[in-house]
Amino acid sequence: MKLSAPADVRILENGFSVGEALAAFNAGHPVSGGIASFVGKVRPDGEVKALELTHYAPLTLPGMEDIAGRALERWQLDGILAWHRIGTLTSGQPIVLVAAAARHRRAAFDATDFVMDHLKSAAWFWKRERRGSGPNGGWHWITPHDADYAARNRWDSP
Amino acid sequence: MIRIVYLGMLADLAGRGESEFGATTEEIDWADLLALLESHMNRHLADAIRADTVKVALNGKVLLDREDLSAKHGDEIALLPPVSGG
């Protein structure tokens, strides 16, 4: 698998292997002293049968690229990876993968954290979950919590 | 034609992901759009779009102020409720 450098940003319609992605990212950054990563997964929840993510093509990928670009400007990074699923997902499947490669660990941790905080509440995705089953089942739209907005805003006042 | 794309919960209220309207005047502004949705779609949709949290993109660019909207034949308007990713 060949990744783009310094930023590899993707919207994925199908499931992906976190292991293969991180192996490729690691291989692409041989001089980095450290790689930090975060995997967001569909939480197992008895009520929730499926999660569906939609996007708006003209905005979503450019918006993710902007977030990745801001991380590259803000920290000394060798590379950044930001992958996000769309479509229907079930419990345990990865939704999002973010990784940052840097000479020093703090930049890698912080850049990963920054990109995740922005993907949660500032990237153009809409999420709903299907709860219950049969005629009692239904789709419910998910909106970010106040904590998600607060997490994002803390990066504005360093 | 002007294409209108409904994202997230707005697609549920519209009952579809997008609609196309023939432009009766040269350009439509924000007030025209609300009136159009109220008369051709439904009141719930128009009310939901009035919420301050709904943003508007014209041809793939988010408007800083949605009241500056000015759309003409061939344009695509996207109605964007609050996002939730990750």
Image (cartoon, coloured by chain):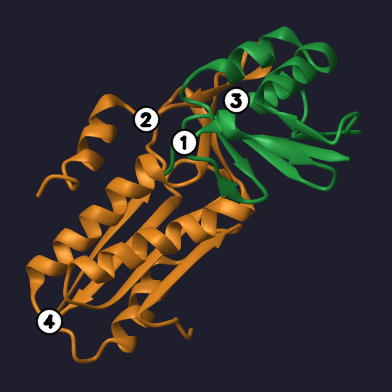
Q: Label 3 vs label 2: CA separation? A: 14 Å
Question: Is A89 placed left or right of A65 in the picture?
Answer: right
Question: Is B6 placed left or right of A73 in the picture?
Answer: right
Disc 1 designates what residue?
B83
* Chain identifier matching the orange colour in the rendered picture: A
Does mark 4 fall on the same chain as mark 1?
Answer: no
| Label 2 neighbour load within 10 Å: few <14, some 14-19, many 20+ | some
**Label 3 secondary element:** helix
| Nearer the observer, B36 or A39 | B36
Disc 2 designates what residue?
A144
- Judged from this view, the residue extending furthest toward the top is B43
User: Residue A138: x, y in percent?
Assistant: 61, 18
Q: Chain of mark 3?
A: B
Q: Label 1 vs label 4: CA separation? A: 33 Å
* Chain identifier matching the green colour in the rendered picture: B
User: Residue A47: x, y in percent?
Assistant: 46, 22
